Image (spheres, coloured by chain):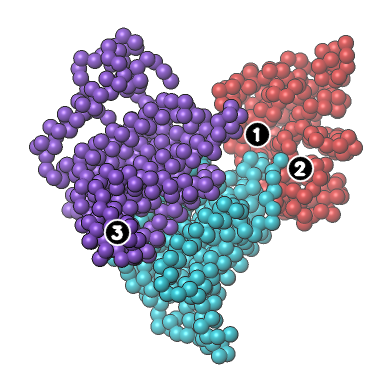
Chain colours: A red, B purple, C cyan
Amino acid sequence: MPDAPILQVSGLNVFRGATHVLKDVSFEVARGELVALIGANGAGKSTTLLALSGLLPARSGTARMTTDEGTIELTRASTETIVRAGLIHCPEGRQIFQSLSVADNLALGAYARTDKDWIAQTTEEVYRLFPILREREKIPAGALSGGEQMMLAMGRALLGAPKLLLLDEPSLGLAPKVIDTIFDVIAELKARGVTILLIEQNAAMALEIADRAHVMEHGRITLSGTGASLMENDRVRQAYLGVSA
Amino acid sequence: MSKSAPETITMGTSGGGQWLAAPLRIALLIAAASVALWLVTAGASAYLTTLVAVMFINAALAVSLTFTNGMTGMFSLGHPAFMTIGAYVAAILTFPSRRKASMLPDLPEFIASLDLSLLPATVIAGLAGALVAFLVGLPVLRLRGHYLAVATLGLIVIVQGLALNWNGITRGGAGLSGIPRLSNIWWAFGFMVLTVAAVWRIKFSSLGRAMMATRENDLAAECTGIDTVRIRMLAFVIGAFFAAVAGALMAHLISVVTPRTYSIVLAFNLVVMIVIGGSGSIVGSVIAAFAITIVSELLRPVEESFGLYGMSQVIVALSLILVLYLRPRGLFGSDEPAFVKHYLNGKKRL
Amino acid sequence: MSQYLFQQLINGLALGSLYALVAIGFSMIYGIVRLINFAHGDLVMIGAFATLGMLFYGTPWPVTLLVVLLVGALAGATIQTVVFRPMLGAPQVTGFIASLAVSITIQNSALMLLSGQPRNFLFPEAMRQRVSLGGVSASLTDLVIIGLTLTLIAILFVIVYRTRLGRAMRATAENLMAARLMGIGVNRTILAAFAIGSALAAVAGLFWGGKFGQIDPLLGSVPGLKAFIACVIGGVGSIGGAMLGGYILGLAEVLFVGLLPQAYAGYRDTFVFSLLILILLIKPSGLFVRHVEERA
C-alpha cells in the first residue's frame, strides 16, 4: 500500500508514573515526509517518540506503522520487533555506547540487519558522509566531541536501515557550524526518501526543513500545518521563533 | 504484639476512646501481657518456655534491625557480628573468676577477677557492641546500597575470624560453654518490651522523622538541615547496642556461644523477618519474627523424621522470594497498623 | 628461584585461576544488570558435584568438561529466569537479598539431597604427579588448572570482543535503553551473560574439587564472597579487571599464609575481608581503574 501513511497515531495517552504526559495525541506521517514536532520543554515531544519506539507503554490509543512488509501496532509490540520493522529512534542526548569503539557502535546500529554485504556497503557510506568517523574508528566513542558523537549517532541510525527515523533534538548542545552539517545530512536523508519525525527546540531550523509540523503544548497538539505556514504563524513566531509581537 | 488487650477500651475510634492517658494505657498493656505470659509459663514445659524466650529475643532483634535498616534505608547485615561480640563479652564477664583464670588464660587480670551479675554484664556487652559499631561505622557508613551490605557481611566474617583465632580470650572454635543460665523468659520479654518501646518512641519523634527523611532522599534531607551522616551513625550504633544485648541474653539462655553461632544465615533470617513484616514497621517485624520462629520450630521434627535437614531454611528463603515478588512492602510497609497507633500514641498523628 | 617460592607461586596462580573464573562470571552479571549475585558461588558447588557424578560413571575428561559447562549454564539461566528477571526494575538491594535467598535455597537443597558429608574428590593418579621444570617441580594438577583456565578466558575474550553476542552484551551492560533501540533482545542477552558466567563458575568447581580434594554442599559461600572481593580489587564490572583481581587475590592469600608464622594462618579470611573493606573505602571502583568516567 504505497499511499498509506507510514505512521498513524490516534488518541495516544501516555503516563509517566502518575503524570498524564500525552493527552489524546493524534497525527499522521506520510511516506517520505519530514514532520517536525516543536514545543517547549516538557510538552511531551520526547515522550511521544519513546512511546512510538516501545520504551514507554501507552495507556490508551493506537500508533500504527505501515511499511511494505505490513502493519504493526507500535503500542503493543516489543522494541525489538519495532526496530526490526524499520523504526529507528535516535534518542535525546545521543545515547551512544561510550566505552565501545566507533566501529563497534556502528556495528551495533546494524544489529538487527542480516545482509552482510548491505552492512559493509552502508558502513562505507556512513564513513563517506562523516569522514571524521573513519579517522576515529577504533577510538572509544566517549572520547569524541559532541558534534562527532551526533554524527556517530546518525551513522548508527542509518545502519539500522530506517524506514521511519525518529530524531530527538539532534542540535542539542552543538556548535552552530556542526548543526548546519547535521541538518545537511538530514536534508540528504530526506532526499533519499527516508521518512523522518523530528523533534527540535531549534524551531527555526526544524520548520525550515519540515514538510509539515505540529506544535505540542502540555501534552496536546495545539497547532498543525505546513512548515512554511507555521513559520508565518504569529503565535509560533512569538513563542518559538523569538520574534516579538 | 499484645496477647490480649482489656476489653473495656474502645480501639480504632478517633478521639473518643481515649479515657486514659497514654503512659497509663501503655502500662496497662504491658501488665496485661505480663499476666498472660505468667499464665503461659505456669503450665508450660521448659522447652516451650525457652522457645517463647527465643521468640521474644528474635522479635527484639527484628525490631532493632528494622530500626537500623528500615527506617534509614541503609542496608546493614551486621547484626550477627554485634551479637557475637555481646555474647562473648557478657559471658566472659559473668563467668566465675576462677573459671576465667583456667579457661581464658590471656584475659587481662582486671577482667578475669570480675564476677558480674547479668544486668551489668549485659549493659557492658551492649556498650561494647555500640563502641565497635561506632568505630566500624566511621569509615564503613560512607558506603551505600549493596556495597554497605557486603561490607557488613565482611564484618561478620572478620568477627568470626577473631573469635575463632583469639584462643586465649575466646577459646577459639570450641566456644564458651557452661555459661550460667542467668536469663530466662522474663528477661527476654522485658528486653523485647524495652526495644519496642525505645524504637517506637524514636520512630514517632523528630529523630524518627529525620531518619525517614534520610531514607526517602538523602540529598533532599541534607537540604533541610538534617545531618544524614550523624543519623545513619546513630541508627547503626543504637541497632548494634540492641543486637549485642540480644546476643548476651541469648548466650545466657542457651548457655553456649561459639564463633559460628551468629552467622550470615541469621542475618538473612532477620532480613526475611523485616521484609515480610514491612521494612520500617515495628509491629510488622514483631509479627514476622514470631511467625518465622514458630514455623521454623514446627518444621524441625518434620526435618528430622524425613532426614531433610535444611528444609525449614529453604522454606524461609523461598518465602522471601515470593514476598519480594508479590508484595515487596511486606505486611505493613514502613507504617504501623492504625489501631495500634491510636492506642499507643493517643491523638491522631503521622 | 627456590623450590619453596616457586611452589607457592604456582599454588597461588592455581588458586588465582579458580578465583578468576568465578570472578569473571560474577563481573559479567554485575556488569549487565548491576546485581551482586550472592548465589554465584554456589554454582561452583554445583559444578563440583556434577563433576563428581560424572567421575563416578567414568566419563572421559573432555566430555566431563563440556557437561559441567552445560550444567552451569543451565543452572544460571534457570536462576535468572525464575528469580532475577521478574525483579529487573527493583532497587539494588532487593536483588541482593533475593540472591542471598537463592544461595540459601541452593545450599540447603543440596544439604537435603546430598547430606553435609564432605565427599572425596580425587583426580585420577595421572593428574596427581609432579612435573619437573629445570630444577623445580610443580603439581600437574595446578598446571592443568592454570592452563585450562587461561584457555577458557581466552575463548571468552574472543566471544565478548569479537562476536555479535559479545557486542550486544557490552552494549546492554553500558546503556540498556540504547541497546534496546538497536533492536537487541535485552532479555536474551542478559540470559546469555548469566549462562556464560555460570558455566565458568561451574568449571571452577571442577578445578576446586581437584585442588582441594574434598567437596561439600556448603562450599559455595567462600568462592562467592571472594569473587566479589576479586572484582572490587580489579575493577567492578570489568572482565579483565575481574581476572586480574582473581589472580592477585589468589597470590595474596597464598603469600599471606606462606610468609607469616603458622599461628596467624587462621586469620587469612579476616585479612582478606579487611582488605575488601579497605578497598571499598578507598577506591570502590577498583584498584586498577584509571579514572571513573562521569556519564553526562
- The secondary structure type at the circle numbered 3 is helix
Q: Which residue is mark 3?
A: B112
Check if mark 1 and mark 3 are on a common chain: no
In the figure, C293 relative to B26: above or below? below
Check if mark 3 and mark 2 are on a common chain: no
Q: Nearer the viewer, mark 1 or mark 3?
A: 3
Which of the labelled discs sits on residue A153, or is there none?
2
Indicate the chain on which mark 2 is placed: A
**Given the current orientation, which residue lies at the most extreme left position?**
B43
Name the quarter where the N terminus of chain B is drawn.
Answer: top left
Q: Residue A151 in the image: x percent, y percent?
A: 81, 43
Between the C-alphas of marks 2 and 1, the distance is 16 Å
Dot 2: within a 10 Å radius of its alpha carbon, few (fewer than 14), some, or many (20 or more) residues? Answer: many
- Kind of residue at disc 1: Ser
Left or right: residue B167 compared with residue B229: left
Query: Foreground: B160 or B28?
Result: B28
Between the C-alphas of marks 1 and 3, the distance is 73 Å
Between the C-alphas of marks 3 and 2, the distance is 73 Å
- The secondary structure type at the circle numbered 2 is helix
Q: Residue B238 in the image: x percent, y percent?
A: 41, 39
Q: Residue C94 in the image: x percent, y percent?
A: 46, 41
Residue A77 visible, this angle: no
N-term mark: 2 or 1: 1
Query: Foreground: A141 or B260?
Result: B260
Q: Residue at x 58, y 85 (%)?
A: C1
Query: Foreground: C227 or B127?
Result: B127
Left or right: residue B177 compared with residue A129: left
Indicate the chain on which mark 3 is placed: B
- Kind of residue at disc 2: Ala
- Kind of residue at disc 3: Ala
**Given the current orientation, which residue lies at the most extreme top position?**
B16
Query: In which quadrant of the rendered view does residue A177 lie?
Result: top right
